[in-house]
Amino acid sequence: MLLQVKNLSHTYDPDIKSNNYTLKDINFEVQKGEFIGLIGHTGSGKSTLVQTLNALIHPTKGEIIIDGQDITKIKNLKEIRKKVGLVFQYPEHQLFEENIAADVSFGPKNLGLNEDEVDRRVKQALEWVNLDYEEFKDRSPFRLSGGQQRRVAIAGVLAMEPEILILDEPTAGLDPKARVELINEIVNLKDKFGLTIILISHRMEEIAQLADRILVLESGKLVLEGSPSYVFDHDSYLEEIGLGIPQITSVMKRLKKKLKLSDMRTDIFTIEDAKQEILKVKRVKDVR
Ligand SMILES: Nc1ncnc2c1ncn2[C@@H]1O[C@H](COP(=O)(O)OP(=O)(O)OP(=O)(O)O)[C@@H](O)[C@H]1O
Ligand SMILES: [Mg+2]
């Protein structure tokens, strides 16, 4: 097992006796190569949780074990950043160097790698996010489109070659085309390198299609966990805690109820799968 979170609690309140906890006794495990979707209503603690995973926040209580080591006990942050790369919400706000190559090389340089290795990683990381190295390396990150800026910021984290890549709402604010492109790049990285990914998103379609397993946070508690089929079968509960299910799943559930199609599957997350399922049910009905 790659990551194990045990009894993790966190309060931002300096007075820990106030009992004002943002994360409350969270437990979960992640296997190498898994794609985890992390969902929850705004303010439920998603960003706080992932910031504890790369030691940006030191949790008030609990253990975070990566490769057998409790990272809450490690003093050398570089060791942790090599293992866990975190792409923040709106990461482009953190670009600061004069040119793109300098920005992407900031992390690997800090790891103390030699110049050739840093160059190799910068080229590779830009290639991974589909930005041509020669075309972009000397350009200012501030003269790029929002989508390109976000890619540069993601490349900066990828250049650290982390074992676990965490993305906090990577597609927020992008147009549909840029969103699909970015998601495809993330999927490619996972397929190519067996990267372990934790993705936060408010887009249930995105999560349903990408995640092997979903974690649901509510008021700092981990309240539901399982495959997309399992989690999105809890539509009433999700609604109660301010979340929805993918639109197409909802259509299938309503169709099943209205037409009394007891055999129809509703763990459906894409239009294509919906079409196939409807055709299948129709064929069965025709034969009968
Ligand atoms: N630096 C901070 N100091 C104090 N309280 C904070 C801090 N950051 C977050 N909080 C509080 O912790 C709670 C969880 O916030 P967090 O940012 O983790 O939620 P989130 O699930 O990521 O929300 P969103 O979907 O809006 O990004 C909120 O009540 C928030 O106000
Ligand atoms: Mg957040």
Image (cartoon, rainbow, N blue to C red):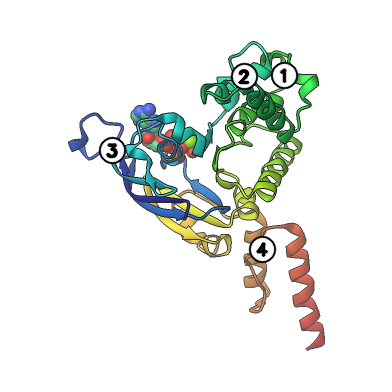
- Indicate the amino acid at tag 3: Thr
- Image coordinates of residue 164 in percent, x first then y, are 53, 43
Q: Is residue 207 left or right of residue 181?
A: left
- Indicate the amino acid at tag 4: Ile
Q: Is residue 68 left or right of residue 180?
A: left
Give the label, 3 or 1, closer to the camera: 3
Disc 3 to disc 4, C-alpha distance: 40 Å
Kindly identify which numbered label has been placed on residue 68.
Answer: none
> Hey, which residue is sitting farthest bottom in the picture?
288
Contact flag, marks 3 and 2 (Cβ < 8 Å): no
Residue beneath label 4, please? Answer: 268
Residue beneath label 1, please? Answer: 144
Contact flag, marks 3 and 4 (Cβ < 8 Å): no
On the question of residue 191 being in view, the answer is yes
Q: How many marks?
A: 4
Snapshot quadrant of residue 147 = top right
Disc 3 to disc 2, C-alpha distance: 32 Å
> Hey, which residue is sitting farthest top in the picture?
98
Between discs 4 and 2, the one toward the N terminus: 2
Give the label, 3 or 2, closer to the camera: 2
Instruction: Please tell me how crowded label 2 is: few (under 14), some (14-19), or many (20+) other residues with Cα within 10 Å.
Output: many
Residue beneath label 3, please? Answer: 60
Between discs 3 and 2, the one toward the N terminus: 3
Residue beneath label 2, please? Answer: 103
